[in-house]
Image (spheres, rainbow, N blue to C red):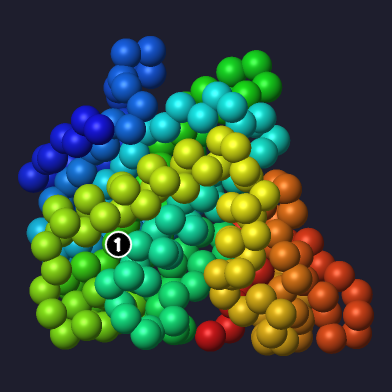
Amino acid sequence: MDIRYFDTLESTNLYCKLLDPDSVEEFTVICARTQTAGIGQPGNVWVSQPGANLTFSLILKPSFLAAADQYELTMMLAVAVAESVSQRVGTHPVAIKWPNDIYVGDKKICGILTTGQIHNIHLSQAICGVGLNVNQTTFPAWVPNPTSLKILTGTDHDIEGVLGDLLRQISLRYEQLKSDAEAIRTRYLQLLYWKDREASYETADGIVRATITGVDRFGHLLLRRADGTTMTCDIKTIRFII
């Protein structure tokens, strides 16, 4: 792997977009100790205390994936990160909150953002951004329900060591994705936050009670309302009430 460290970047994802896709190698990793404009889901920013957390972007070239199946890459990353975090937090329950956050209990420890480039009908390149709270223990009041490895374990963690563990797990799951995408989907659903549990959600139609039943091929969240009818939700059309 080509791992490049920077003291400060505006955004590791934006930096990756400036690289020549024809010359950059797969598994190139851009890691910043400080991001001045970290990117979250559209319309969101990623807040990180300088030097305290892990913020990096990974370049993959999953040409084996059809463009229509690109959410499989997000599932793979979420599974790998969740498993790596779980190895560090002991008995604390780790889950994947749709579409791409990692939760420990009811608190967010990591966000994942994947952007892809399509050639013909396949995914030619993907930039996979990961922001993991490692040693930060205080957060701005407006950041919803955050946690970190240090908060959960009471100890400092070596950030480069955390990165190494994450990349090894991503590499293992990435190889599995090439040959057995269904196993990745099965594991993703096993780890899916609030799956098979009735809960309250905020939608454009107001508060609804519903149960997550799965995720479709395109990454839409599937739910069953209390009255038995079904919902298919895209990003930003539904909010978990935690």
Question: Do we see residue 225 in this rendering?
Answer: yes
Left of 111 or right of it: where is 164? Answer: left
- Dividing the picture into quadrants, the one containing residue 233 is bottom right
Using a 10 Å C-alpha cutoff, classify the residue at mark 1 as few (fewer than 14 neighbours), some (14 to 19) or many (20 or more). Answer: many
Assign the N terminus to one quadrant of the image: top left
What is the secondary structure assignment of the residue under circle 1? strand
Q: Is residue 11 above or below residue 52?
A: above
- Dividing the picture into quadrants, the one containing residue 239 is bottom right
Q: In this view, does 127 lie above or below 34?
A: above
Residue flagged by tag 1: what amino acid is it? Leu
Find the residue positioned furthest to the right: 228
| Residue picked out by circle 1 | 132
- The residue depicted at 68 percent of the width and 22 percent of the height is 121
- Residue 19 screen position, x and y as percent: 30, 22
- Dividing the picture into quadrants, the one containing residue 198 is bottom right
Which sits in the foreground, 104 or 19? 104
- Residue 109 screen position, x and y as percent: 35, 71
Label total for image: 1
- The residue depicted at 65 percent of the width and 16 percent of the height is 120
Which sits in the foreground, 18 or 89? 89
Question: Do we see residue 40 in this rendering?
Answer: no
Left of 183 or right of it: where is 142? Answer: left
- The residue depicted at 49 percent of the width and 58 percent of the height is 79
Left of 28 or right of it: where is 210? Answer: right
Which sits in the foreground, 241 or 205? 241
- Residue 154 screen position, x and y as percent: 16, 85
- The residue depicted at 46 percent of the width and 27 percent of the height is 61
- Residue 142 screen position, x and y as percent: 34, 77
